[in-house]
Amino acid sequence: MRYLHTMVRVSDLDASLDFYCHKLGLVEASRIDNPAGRFTLVFLCAPGDEAAARETRAPMVELTFNWDPEDYQGGRNFGHLAYAVDDIYAVCQRLMDGGVTINRPPRDGHMAFVRSPDGISIELLQAGERKAPAEPWVSMQNTGAW
């Protein structure tokens, strides 16, 4: 048995791709438009994993966009997606600069949480050793839920 992907339903594909790709930094590995089923599937992976993802050898996130409007509530009930990042402070700054709220700032130099446009909680973990606590992160308060 091996892990393949996690599926997340999204209500606005463009806003979700902006968040996951342009702000969070994932890349699109493949896409399936199914007119008969009236849905689009977009598979995302970490940068550098594109070739492995196309062969389903890398973990991916599957964004499922149903063309007919649906109400998706309870994104927190999903749990969260987690990604290791090379520089948690730089990633959080890039996200903030892109208009993303840092719900749980990386005060400890190790862990932060943000939310996707559909309310999916995303955990960011510093790869390797945690960074030394630094401003503005140390003084930031939590915002909302994660």
Image (tube, rainbow, N blue to C red):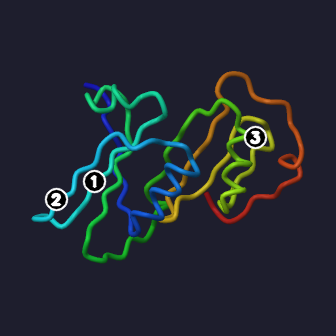
Residue assigned mark 3: 89
Q: Percent x, y for residue 110? A: 72, 35
Q: Amino acid at mark 2?
A: Asn
Which quadrant is home to the C terminus?
Answer: bottom right
Q: Percent x, y for residue 40? A: 26, 59
Considering only vertical position in the picture, is 141 above or below 43? below
4 horizontally vs 102: left or right: left
Residue assigned mark 1: 41
Residue located at (30% from left, 43% from top): 30
Asked if labels 3 and 1 touch by Cβ distance under 8 angstroms, the answer is: no
Element at label 1: strand
Element at label 2: strand
Residue located at (26% from left, 71% from top): 67
Label 2 CA crowd tier, 10 Å (few <14, some 14–19, many 20+):
few
Label 1 CA crowd tier, 10 Å (few <14, some 14–19, many 20+):
many
93 horizontally vs 49: left or right: right
Label 3 CA crowd tier, 10 Å (few <14, some 14–19, many 20+):
many
Residue located at (62% from left, 54% from top): 114
Q: Percent x, y for residue 143? A: 72, 63
Which of the 4 image quarters holds residue 2?
A: top left
Element at label 3: helix
**How much space separates mark 2 and mark 3, taking CA atoms?**
39 Å
Asked if labels 2 and 1 touch by Cβ distance under 8 angstroms, the answer is: yes
**How much space separates mark 1 and mark 2, taking CA atoms?**
8 Å
Residue assigned mark 2: 34
